[in-house]
Amino acid sequence: MAGRSPVTFEIKSTNLPLLTLRLKSANLDTLATELQTHYGEMPGFFEDDLLVIDLGTLPNDTAALDFERLDALLKGCHLRPVAVAGGSPELMAAALTVGLFAAPDWNQTQSQPLSSTPAQPQREIQQVDLPASGALVIDKPLRSGQQVYARGRDLVLLAACNPGAEAIADGHIHVYAPLRGRAIAGARGWSQACIFTLNMQPELVSIAGVYLTSEQGLTPEIQGHAARVHLDTTEAGDKLIFQPLV
Protein backbone atom coordinates (compact mmCIF):
# COMPACT_ATOMS: atom_id res chain seq x y z
CA MET A 1 0.00 0.00 0.00
CA ALA A 2 1.49 3.35 -1.04
CA GLY A 3 2.07 5.91 1.70
CA ARG A 4 0.11 9.13 1.63
CA SER A 5 0.86 12.48 3.29
CA PRO A 6 -1.97 14.16 5.19
CA VAL A 7 -3.45 17.07 3.28
CA THR A 8 -4.77 18.88 6.35
CA PHE A 9 -1.73 18.98 8.67
CA GLU A 10 1.98 18.41 9.21
CA ILE A 11 3.79 17.46 12.43
CA LYS A 12 7.37 18.61 12.77
CA SER A 13 9.83 19.05 15.59
CA THR A 14 10.63 22.57 16.74
CA ASN A 15 12.67 24.43 19.32
CA LEU A 16 10.72 26.90 21.43
CA PRO A 17 12.35 29.81 23.25
CA LEU A 18 11.76 29.11 26.94
CA LEU A 19 12.66 30.85 30.15
CA THR A 20 13.61 28.88 33.23
CA LEU A 21 12.68 29.80 36.79
CA ARG A 22 15.17 28.13 39.11
CA LEU A 23 13.16 28.02 42.32
CA LYS A 24 15.39 28.18 45.39
CA SER A 25 12.75 28.43 48.09
CA ALA A 26 9.17 27.31 48.67
CA ASN A 27 8.44 30.57 50.51
CA LEU A 28 6.03 32.19 48.07
CA ASP A 29 5.59 35.30 50.22
CA THR A 30 9.27 36.10 49.70
CA LEU A 31 9.02 35.19 46.02
CA ALA A 32 6.08 37.58 45.58
CA THR A 33 8.05 40.38 47.23
CA GLU A 34 11.13 39.79 45.10
CA LEU A 35 9.16 39.56 41.88
CA GLN A 36 7.54 42.89 42.71
CA THR A 37 10.91 44.42 43.62
CA HIS A 38 12.64 43.33 40.43
CA TYR A 39 9.85 43.49 37.85
CA GLY A 40 7.04 45.51 39.41
CA GLU A 41 8.26 48.72 37.78
CA MET A 42 8.78 46.99 34.42
CA PRO A 43 5.34 45.56 33.58
CA GLY A 44 6.34 45.00 29.95
CA PHE A 45 9.53 43.08 30.71
CA PHE A 46 7.86 39.74 30.03
CA GLU A 47 5.34 39.25 27.23
CA ASP A 48 3.61 35.99 28.12
CA ASP A 49 6.92 34.15 27.78
CA LEU A 50 6.74 30.38 28.17
CA LEU A 51 8.38 29.18 31.37
CA VAL A 52 9.77 25.94 32.80
CA ILE A 53 9.90 25.78 36.60
CA ASP A 54 13.09 24.05 37.69
CA LEU A 55 12.50 22.47 41.10
CA GLY A 56 15.97 20.94 41.28
CA THR A 57 17.35 23.80 43.38
CA LEU A 58 14.72 23.63 46.12
CA PRO A 59 15.99 22.51 49.54
CA ASN A 60 16.01 18.73 49.82
CA ASP A 61 13.46 18.80 52.64
CA THR A 62 10.81 20.64 50.57
CA ALA A 63 7.74 18.45 50.94
CA ALA A 64 5.06 20.63 49.39
CA LEU A 65 4.56 23.68 47.19
CA ASP A 66 1.44 25.71 46.49
CA PHE A 67 1.51 25.42 42.69
CA GLU A 68 -1.80 27.25 42.25
CA ARG A 69 -0.42 30.34 43.98
CA LEU A 70 2.93 30.00 42.22
CA ASP A 71 1.14 29.85 38.87
CA ALA A 72 -0.85 32.97 39.76
CA LEU A 73 2.27 34.88 40.86
CA LEU A 74 4.09 34.11 37.63
CA LYS A 75 1.12 34.91 35.43
CA GLY A 76 0.87 38.22 37.26
CA CYS A 77 4.33 38.99 35.82
CA HIS A 78 3.14 38.00 32.31
CA LEU A 79 4.92 34.65 32.44
CA ARG A 80 3.20 31.46 31.30
CA PRO A 81 4.36 28.35 33.22
CA VAL A 82 4.01 25.26 31.04
CA ALA A 83 6.19 22.61 32.68
CA VAL A 84 8.16 21.56 35.74
CA ALA A 85 11.39 19.64 36.03
CA GLY A 86 13.82 18.30 38.58
CA GLY A 87 11.40 17.88 41.50
CA SER A 88 10.67 14.99 43.81
CA PRO A 89 7.94 12.55 42.70
CA GLU A 90 5.55 14.22 45.16
CA LEU A 91 6.20 17.72 43.86
CA MET A 92 6.01 16.62 40.24
CA ALA A 93 2.67 14.91 40.88
CA ALA A 94 1.32 18.03 42.60
CA ALA A 95 2.37 20.15 39.62
CA LEU A 96 0.43 17.92 37.25
CA THR A 97 -2.79 18.62 39.14
CA VAL A 98 -2.65 22.32 38.13
CA GLY A 99 -2.07 21.60 34.44
CA LEU A 100 1.71 21.73 34.27
CA PHE A 101 3.42 18.89 32.47
CA ALA A 102 6.55 17.08 33.54
CA ALA A 103 9.73 17.56 31.56
CA PRO A 104 11.67 14.42 32.57
CA ASP A 105 14.24 14.79 29.79
CA TRP A 106 14.89 18.44 30.58
CA ASN A 107 18.50 19.31 29.83
CA GLN A 108 19.70 20.73 33.14
CA THR A 109 22.63 22.46 31.45
CA GLN A 110 20.08 24.70 29.73
CA SER A 111 19.01 26.15 33.03
CA GLN A 112 22.32 25.98 34.85
CA PRO A 113 22.95 29.50 36.11
CA LEU A 114 26.23 31.13 36.77
CA SER A 115 27.09 30.93 40.46
CA SER A 116 25.22 33.59 42.41
CA THR A 117 27.13 36.33 44.14
CA PRO A 118 26.18 37.28 47.71
CA ALA A 119 24.99 40.66 46.42
CA GLN A 120 22.48 39.14 43.98
CA PRO A 121 20.76 36.06 45.43
CA GLN A 122 17.60 36.66 43.40
CA ARG A 123 19.13 35.67 40.07
CA GLU A 124 16.67 32.91 39.24
CA ILE A 125 15.10 33.58 35.87
CA GLN A 126 17.41 32.54 33.06
CA GLN A 127 17.44 32.55 29.29
CA VAL A 128 20.79 31.76 27.69
CA ASP A 129 19.96 32.05 23.98
CA LEU A 130 22.10 34.52 22.05
CA PRO A 131 20.08 37.70 21.46
CA ALA A 132 18.82 38.27 17.94
CA SER A 133 20.87 40.28 15.46
CA GLY A 134 20.27 43.96 15.06
CA ALA A 135 20.14 46.70 17.68
CA LEU A 136 17.77 49.27 19.08
CA VAL A 137 19.38 52.69 18.47
CA ILE A 138 18.39 55.70 20.59
CA ASP A 139 19.72 59.08 19.44
CA LYS A 140 18.32 61.27 22.22
CA PRO A 141 19.48 61.52 25.84
CA LEU A 142 17.74 59.32 28.40
CA ARG A 143 16.53 61.61 31.15
CA SER A 144 15.77 60.85 34.80
CA GLY A 145 12.78 58.53 35.08
CA GLN A 146 13.02 57.28 31.49
CA GLN A 147 13.58 53.63 30.71
CA VAL A 148 14.34 51.89 27.43
CA TYR A 149 14.42 48.13 26.91
CA ALA A 150 15.92 46.35 23.88
CA ARG A 151 14.11 43.02 23.93
CA GLY A 152 16.11 40.20 22.37
CA ARG A 153 18.83 42.47 20.96
CA ASP A 154 21.54 45.02 21.66
CA LEU A 155 20.94 48.61 22.75
CA VAL A 156 22.92 51.52 21.31
CA LEU A 157 22.72 54.94 22.94
CA LEU A 158 24.13 57.81 20.91
CA ALA A 159 23.52 60.31 23.70
CA ALA A 160 23.91 60.31 27.46
CA CYS A 161 22.15 58.03 29.90
CA ASN A 162 21.56 60.52 32.70
CA PRO A 163 21.18 59.89 36.44
CA GLY A 164 17.83 58.28 37.21
CA ALA A 165 17.49 56.81 33.69
CA GLU A 166 17.64 53.10 32.95
CA ALA A 167 19.00 51.32 29.87
CA ILE A 168 18.10 47.62 29.63
CA ALA A 169 18.99 45.09 26.93
CA ASP A 170 18.91 41.33 26.49
CA GLY A 171 22.19 41.76 24.58
CA HIS A 172 25.04 44.26 24.79
CA ILE A 173 24.70 47.93 25.72
CA HIS A 174 26.79 50.52 23.86
CA VAL A 175 26.76 54.08 25.18
CA TYR A 176 28.64 56.50 22.89
CA ALA A 177 28.32 59.19 25.53
CA PRO A 178 28.45 59.43 29.34
CA LEU A 179 26.79 56.59 31.23
CA ARG A 180 25.52 58.17 34.46
CA GLY A 181 22.32 56.18 35.02
CA ARG A 182 21.64 52.44 35.24
CA ALA A 183 22.75 49.97 32.58
CA ILE A 184 21.42 46.39 32.69
CA ALA A 185 22.78 44.10 29.97
CA GLY A 186 22.04 40.41 29.48
CA ALA A 187 18.75 41.13 31.23
CA ARG A 188 17.43 37.62 30.68
CA GLY A 189 20.55 35.84 31.78
CA TRP A 190 22.83 36.06 28.72
CA SER A 191 26.17 35.99 30.52
CA GLN A 192 28.25 36.98 27.48
CA ALA A 193 26.69 40.44 27.34
CA CYS A 194 28.95 43.48 27.75
CA ILE A 195 28.48 47.16 28.53
CA PHE A 196 30.57 49.72 26.65
CA THR A 197 30.69 53.45 27.26
CA LEU A 198 32.91 56.43 26.45
CA ASN A 199 32.46 57.80 29.98
CA MET A 200 31.84 55.36 32.86
CA GLN A 201 30.01 57.09 35.72
CA PRO A 202 27.08 54.71 36.36
CA GLU A 203 24.65 54.56 39.24
CA LEU A 204 24.47 50.82 38.59
CA VAL A 205 25.73 48.31 36.05
CA SER A 206 24.42 44.76 35.80
CA ILE A 207 25.12 41.78 33.56
CA ALA A 208 22.97 38.66 33.78
CA GLY A 209 21.83 39.69 37.24
CA VAL A 210 25.26 40.37 38.75
CA TYR A 211 25.49 44.04 39.61
CA LEU A 212 27.62 46.80 41.09
CA THR A 213 26.36 50.15 42.35
CA SER A 214 28.04 53.54 42.53
CA GLU A 215 28.33 53.18 46.31
CA GLN A 216 30.83 50.39 45.76
CA GLY A 217 33.02 52.72 43.70
CA LEU A 218 35.19 52.34 40.62
CA THR A 219 38.94 52.61 40.26
CA PRO A 220 40.39 55.94 39.00
CA GLU A 221 41.35 54.46 35.61
CA ILE A 222 37.69 53.45 35.05
CA GLN A 223 35.66 56.23 36.67
CA GLY A 224 34.91 58.89 34.07
CA HIS A 225 36.81 57.11 31.30
CA ALA A 226 35.98 54.92 28.31
CA ALA A 227 35.51 51.38 29.60
CA ARG A 228 34.02 47.96 29.03
CA VAL A 229 32.25 45.74 31.56
CA HIS A 230 31.90 41.99 31.20
CA LEU A 231 31.11 39.04 33.45
CA ASP A 232 33.82 36.68 34.60
CA THR A 233 32.82 33.26 35.93
CA THR A 234 35.07 31.27 38.23
CA GLU A 235 34.64 28.55 40.83
CA ALA A 236 34.57 31.29 43.45
CA GLY A 237 31.55 32.91 41.80
CA ASP A 238 30.66 35.62 39.31
CA LYS A 239 32.39 38.97 39.13
CA LEU A 240 32.00 42.06 36.98
CA ILE A 241 35.25 42.99 35.26
CA PHE A 242 35.91 46.62 34.27
CA GLN A 243 38.52 47.28 31.57
CA PRO A 244 39.67 50.60 30.10
CA LEU A 245 39.04 51.09 26.38
CA VAL A 246 42.22 52.34 24.76
Image (spheres, rainbow, N blue to C red):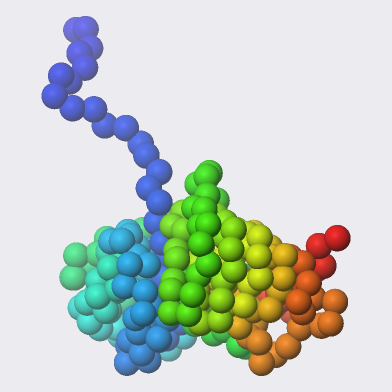
Give x and y (percent) for residue 76.
24, 75
Residue farthest along the left direction in this orientation: 8
Give x and y (percent) for residue 63.
34, 86
Quadrant for the C terminus in the image: bottom right
Q: Residue at x 32, y 32 (%)?
A: 12
Q: Residue at x 37, y 48 (%)?
A: 16
Task: Please give left or right for residue 132 compared with residue 195 in the image.
Answer: left
Give x and y (percent) for residue 100.
25, 64
Give x and y (percent) for residue 17.
40, 51
Image quarter of residue 240: bottom right
Residue 61 is at least partly visible in this image: yes
Q: Is residue 178 above or below residue 31?
A: above
Q: Residue at x 63, y 63 (%)?
A: 175
Q: Residue at x 23, y 27 (%)?
A: 10
Of 243 and 20, the residue lying toward us: 243
Residue 129 is at least partly visible in this image: no
Number of numbered discs overlaid on the protein picture: 0
Quadrant for the N terminus in the image: top left
Of 226 and 34, the residue lying toward us: 226
Task: Please give left or right for residue 54 compared with residue 171 in the image.
Answer: left
